[in-house]
Amino acid sequence: MTRLNLLLLLALLASSVYLVRVSYDERRLYAALDRARTEQRQLETEHGRLQAEQQAQATPARIDKTARDKLLMVPATSAIMKQVVVSAAPTASQGRP
Amino acid sequence: MSSGRRPERSTTRAAASARGLNYASSPLLASRTPASRSKLLVAMVGLGFLVLLGRAVYVQAIGTDFYQKQGEIRYARTLDLSASRGRILDRNGQLMAASVPAPSLWAIPKDFKADPSERARLARLLGMSPAQLEDRLDGSANFVWLRRQVDDTLAKDVLSLGLPGIHQVREFRRQYPEGEAAAHVVGFTNIEDRGQEGIELAFQKDLVGRNGSRRVIKDRIGRVVEDIGDSVAAVDGRDIQLSIDSKLQYFAYRRLRDAVMENKAKAGSVVVLDAQSGEVLALANYPSYAPSDRRNLSGNQLRNRALTDTFEPGSTVKPLIAAWALETGRVKPDTVIHTAPGRMSLGPFTVRDTHPHGDMTVSEVIQKSSNIGAIRMGLMFQPREMWDLYASVGFGQKPQIGFPGVVGGRLKSQKQLDEITRATMSYGYGLSASLFQIAHAYTVFAHDGEYIPVTMMKSDSPEGAAKVGGVRVISPQTAQTMRQMLSLAAGPGGTAPKAQTPGYSVGGKSGTAYAHAGKGYDTKKYRSWFVGLSPIKDPRIIVAVMVDEPTAGKWYGGEVAAPVFSDLVQHTLRMLGVPPDLDVKTQIVARNAPAEDESF
């Protein structure tokens, strides 16, 4: 009986130590998870910012300016427009420069 | 006596067992204390335990909430989870407004310590003079904003100076990639991220989302180690998808700006509606402003003229009058109306046509925009009929588009519609409407006689879905006849041949009026506009253009506004993938036909 009790006591001690260790691990891992989540949020925000920036670089205003100033393009006028009618595909029959 | 015996016994016992010492019989311990004292002691100890037990019960059971709370205060923290503001997108998913991180820098002046060279460096980074920085730091001992919503990199530079007492707080700033082209539609937020204008204001509730919070346990170095209790997740603001097409919006804005500058005008507006779905494809005003830099803004720039400025719609309502006269069978397109001698007395006023035309058919009245012809038709109606006609196309009512600052214009009550009023209202005076309302009214012609609801939101139905339903005002046949008349008005011999565009048939009506000045009109200032649709057979779009106070020698709507209409129709229909319904070449010749001077 005494021996069984001793064994149980040992088991209890071991389990307690293990519990301490596990809960320590849990907290450590949770902290890591939380850090990762924060980083995820930051990266998401950054992604949003970069997306906005990318679009700011591709706005019609900027494209228009670049096309006019750098590429010396002009809007298509009727003088340089030729209408092509493709009977098979009616959607392709738009007037194109 | 007994004491005399005890030592002897003890010595004998001690001798008997060398290992054990019998303490119980030690004379030193021989107690002479009365039993009551030991009982008292036991009672005292017992009482002590009772007190401890009571305390334990109190701590564990009765006062537990208080102690639990006190404990939590020492290790638990509530973290705010901020919801991010929703984005505003155009119909193709292009960003029109988005939140980007922009930290704000603040300081605790009493903690702030820096030598003059460090102060100078900080001031330079913050973009202020050292004196300004000192001023700011003197403002309060505990808290001052150094600079709000700066770039991420600048905030890092400032913090890397390592000066004590300087902190940053994460904030977000709105970015508007479309800039001034879409400023009136999108609007802007203030520094607290609340919508102030446009869609940002109209949809503040949807955009803002809801902040959340979570209770956590933090360790000594501030790491979150455990979640406790209830956490409320942050709900991000909803994205708003507009019906606006950002490419078209930019094109409309640019074309309008060019027209305003070319005509040395004061201002202008453009509205492009999808005639089938009722969606607003573009809505632009000039002058505009850059939403990201709102210093020195004037009301002139801020005003969303297309929705807030009302004026007398003038000639643009004549087709409505003609449509009702046709609908009720009072006239046919070729019924002859006498307009000679080109003027007419209305009480104290005389109404004139720019050129006397003599006898004209109803079609010609619209084509040449004859005031007398319109009055003759308008006077055929009962007051109630005329009021119903105007009210059924939205005059006098605010357009239901959920936009701030929208106005409904003015429509007199039925009782006020005496003969003179009805006559003036027949050619578009004595009532007022915004450019948006006039464009909206034209859905009656474009949508086969139905007045359809318009919206700034992208409709959920897939592309090419059935047309939206509306309230029937005139029959499809009348609408079709009216479109033919409108195409005559925009053709050779009409008031606005410049509205024509290569490849697409167009129809529309120009309008010109003297600008209001005090109680009357200023005959040196004009307002010119044009409202039309295209293609004639099955209209896809309605375009309305208004230019305020052109001063470069041209003032007729057909001269000033129609060319803008022409370019917009061309561009929009090509972008929508609508196949041309006309041969391109024939139109180039007709476009240069001289315009008929319009009566206003």
Image: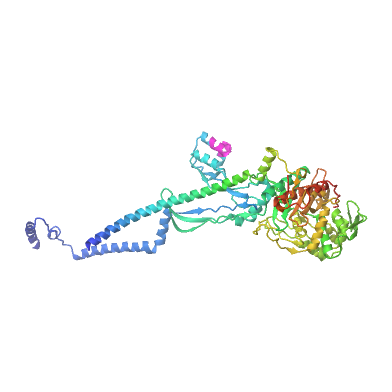
Name the magenta segment's main secondary structure. helix
In the depicted view, which residue is nearer to us: B8 or B245?
B245
- Going 39% across and 64% down the picture, which residue do you hit? B62
- Image position, residue B433 (x, y; %): 77, 56
**B290 in the magenta segment:** no
The residue at the far top in this view is B117
Q: Is residue B480 visible?
A: yes
Q: Which residues are the magenta region? A: B120-133
**B132 in the magenta segment:** yes
Q: Is residue B171 visible?
A: no
In the depicted view, which residue is nearer to us: B501 or B382?
B501
In the depicted view, which residue is nearer to us: B298 or B173?
B173
Q: Quadrant of residue B242?
A: bottom right
- Image position, residue B434 (x, y; %): 75, 55
Q: Is residue B32 left or right of residue B528?
A: left
Residue B39's place in the image compared with B405, above or below, is below
Residue B188's place in the image compared with B347, above or below, is above
The residue at the far front in this view is A88
- Image position, residue B528 (x, y; %): 80, 49
